[in-house]
């Protein structure tokens, strides 16, 4: 990623803060660039978490907790209010862990670091497996069962399935980087097919369509069956408390007064 692009994104963050009267706590790349298989023309999926002044949260009128700043061929920029993020963390929403673990960080703060110290304690193995399994099943059914397929869609099935394996093996949120997941979880006999596709995707603006890769499809179908059984058998009982999240939120508001 060029220094020029990073500089532009950082300027946009400052513009958002000034226009919206917010403070950005953490901002990352969340899409294919963070996953490590971006095409040359991939856009920038910029995601941030922000906090508003304390009085904003005391209004009786319901207010929007999302900022959608820009969406075009180059940038996809949006953010969540800290309240929204913490409520989703309580529910173990996998997107929260992805933003926390992104290898591309545009901005962060000490406040975010304190919040992130407790984040993983809210991770649910069952929720994680169900989320990634649902993503894999949808993309497989939608894009990869015909004779001619959109080849890049293999990554939108393979990555979530490898994330399921990671969660099952390590009981922790999966890493963002596809290469790390592949190294840890993918069998050696399947790897050459994936590596060939990966090389094409990263070097070609639009990888296009091609003949279905039967070896990968068989692996995918088998893995979906295995993960479905595993998800159904996984015990989802865990202690959850609002206490740490309430303390983190109130600490931010007190600091902003």
Image: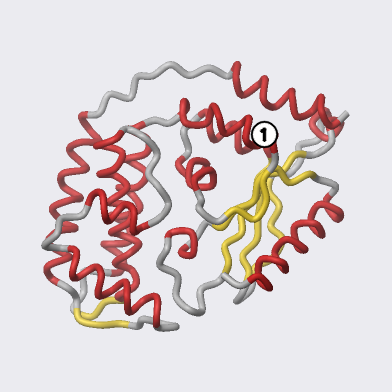
Q: Where is residue 241 in the image (x, y as percent from the top left)?
A: 53, 17
Give the quarter of the figure containing the N terminus: bottom right
Height in image: 108 above or below 249?
A: below
Residue 117: image quadrant is top right
The image quadrant of residue 70 is: bottom right
Q: Which of 239 and 1 is in front in this view?
A: 1
Helix, strand or loop status at disc 1: helix
Give the vertical position of 9 relative to 117 (above or below).
below
> What residue appears at the point 75 percent right and 39 percent down from the top-left corner?
51
On the image, which quarter does residue 136 sit in? bottom left
- Tell whether 82 sits left or right of 186: right
Q: Is residue 59 visible?
A: no
Where does residue 155 sit, x and y in percent of width and height? Answer: 33, 64
Q: Position of residue 217 (x, y in %)?
A: 16, 65
Q: Nearer the viewer, residue 233 or 33?
A: 33
Q: In which quarter of the image is the C terminus?
A: top right
Left or right: residue 95 compared with residue 156 = right
The residue located at (39%, 81%) in the rendering is 203
**Is residue 178 positioned above or below 242 on the image?**
below
Q: Where is residue 232 in the image (x, y as percent from the top left)?
A: 22, 33
Q: Residue shown at 64%/73% (left/top)?
A: 72
- For the point 74% across and 23% down, the residue is 250
Q: State the colouring used for the structure image.
A: secondary structure
Can residue 39 be spotted in the picture?
yes
Q: Residues within 10 Å of mark 1 (few under 14, many from 20)?
A: some
Mark 1 = which residue? 83
Q: How many marks?
A: 1
């Amino acid at each position: 990623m060029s220094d020029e692009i990073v500089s532009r994104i950082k300027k946009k963050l400052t513009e958002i803060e000034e226009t919206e009267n917010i403070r950005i706590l953490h901002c990352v790349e969340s899409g294919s660039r963070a996953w490590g298989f971006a095409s040359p023309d991939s856009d920038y999926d910029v995601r941030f978490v922000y906090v508003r002044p304390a009085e904003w949260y005391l209004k009786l009128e319901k207010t929007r907790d999302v900022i959608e700043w820009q969406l075009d061929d180059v940038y996809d920029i949006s953010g969540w209010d800290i309240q929204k993020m913490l409520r989703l963390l309580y529910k173990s929403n996998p997107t929260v862990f992805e933003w926390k673990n992104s290898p591309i960080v545009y901005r962060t703060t000490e406040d975010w670091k304190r919040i992130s110290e407790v984040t993983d304690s809210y991770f649910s193995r069952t929720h994680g497996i169900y989320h990634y399994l649902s993503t894999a099943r949808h993309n497989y059914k939608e894009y990869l069962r015909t004779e001619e397929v959109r080849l890049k869609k293999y990554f939108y099935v393979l990555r979530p399935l490898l994330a399921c394996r990671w969660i099952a093996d390590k009981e922790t949120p999966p890493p963002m980087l596809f290469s790390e997941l592949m190294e840890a979880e993918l069998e050696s006999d399947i790897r050459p097919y994936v590596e060939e596709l990966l090389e094409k995707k990263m070097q070609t603006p639009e990888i296009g369509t091609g003949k279905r890769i039967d070896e990968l499809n068989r692996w995918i179908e088998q893995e979906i069956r295995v993960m479905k059984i595993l998800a159904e058998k996984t015990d989802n009982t865990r202690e959850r408390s609002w206490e740490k999240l309430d303390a983190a939120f109130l600490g931010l508001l007190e600091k902003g007064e």
